[in-house]
Image (cartoon, rainbow, N blue to C red):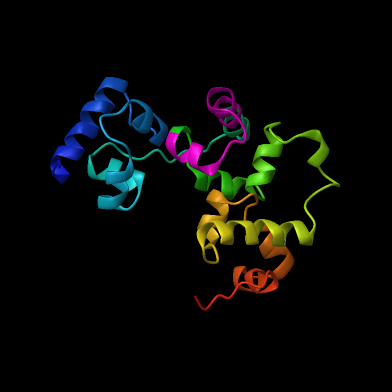
């Protein structure tokens, strides 16, 4: 297993090849390592870049660029575009999408990746939300965390929070104990 300094040196060398600090997607797709050991050691991708002396990737990203990257992911990896795809192959962080859009559904909808028959006016009702969280709970064998619902569920947590106020209250409404 490489040392911290070896990981940083590999990161610097890859940045030299690119002529700029790599994005998470570039590192995961073409770099010498995935971004996982960098997150494990330095807590975030930008912290690892800074530790390597490369600056950060903080910049204002146009909404059109975010949507275009979702469309690229759909073309390259198929639909539905999941948060895992963004983490593994996307140009931008999933956090950027969650900050910019109301929900993961909204980001995909604006990118043109949601079928017409489930667009505005036909969104998910309460029974469907409860069914989706129960389905994931059955798959996991326990109530899902917020992160698990965002990553693996049919819905993000956004409509649950809007409807029930907190994730725990949404789980209670679905008849799932939060004491486990």
- Is 27 situated above or below 39? above
Viewer-proximal residue among 131 and 56:
131
Residue extending farthest to the right is 121
Does residue 37 appear in the picture of this structure? yes
The mark tally for this picture is 0
Viewer-proximal residue among 1 and 47:
1
Does residue 22 appear in the picture of this structure? no
The magenta region covers: 69-88
Q: Is residue 87 left or right of residue 102?
A: left
- Is 103 situated above or below 165? above
Pinpoint residue 129: horizontal percent, then vertical percent: 72, 58
Pinpoint residue 23: horizontal percent, then vertical percent: 39, 33
- Is 92 situated above or below 176? above
Viewer-proximal residue among 99 and 41:
41
| Residue at left offset 57%, top offset 44% | 97
| Residue at left offset 82%, top offset 44% | 120
When asked about the image quadrant of residue 14, the answer is: top left
- Is 69 situated above or below 127? above
Pinpoint residue 165: horizontal percent, then vertical percent: 68, 70
When asked about the image quadrant of residue 9, the answer is: top left
Q: Is residue 83 left or right of residue 38?
A: right
Pinpoint residue 95: horizontal percent, then vertical percent: 51, 48
Tell me if residue 62 is in the magenta stretch: no
Q: Is residue 43 left or right of residue 66?
A: left
| Residue at left offset 60%, top offset 72% | 168
- Type of secondary structure dominating the magenta stretch: helix
When asked about the image quadrant of residue 127, the answer is: bottom right
- Location of the N terminus (image quadrant): top left
| Residue at left offset 25%, top offset 30% | 32
């Amino acid at each position: 297993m490489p040392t911290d300094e070896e990981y940083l040196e590999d990161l610097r060398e890859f940045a030299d090849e690119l002529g700029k600090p790599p994005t998470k997607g570039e590192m995961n797709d073409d770099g010498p390592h995935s971004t996982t050991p960098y997150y494990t050691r330095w807590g975030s991708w930008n912290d690892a870049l800074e530790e390597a002396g490369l600056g950060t990737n903080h910049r204002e990203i146009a909404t059109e660029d975010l949507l275009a990257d979702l469309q690229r992911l759909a073309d390259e990896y198929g639909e539905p575009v999941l948060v895992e795809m963004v983490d593994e192959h996307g140009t931008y962080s999933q956090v950027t999408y969650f900050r910019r859009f109301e929900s993961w559904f909204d980001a995909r909808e604006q990118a043109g990746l949601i079928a017409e028959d489930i667009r505005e006016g036909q969104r998910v009702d309460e029974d469907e939300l409860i069914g989706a969280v129960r389905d994931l709970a059955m798959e996991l064998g326990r109530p899902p965390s917020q992160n698990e619902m965002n990553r693996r569920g049919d819905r993000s947590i956004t409509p649950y929070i809007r409807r029930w106020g907190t994730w725990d209250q949404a789980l209670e409404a679905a008849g799932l104990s939060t004491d486990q």
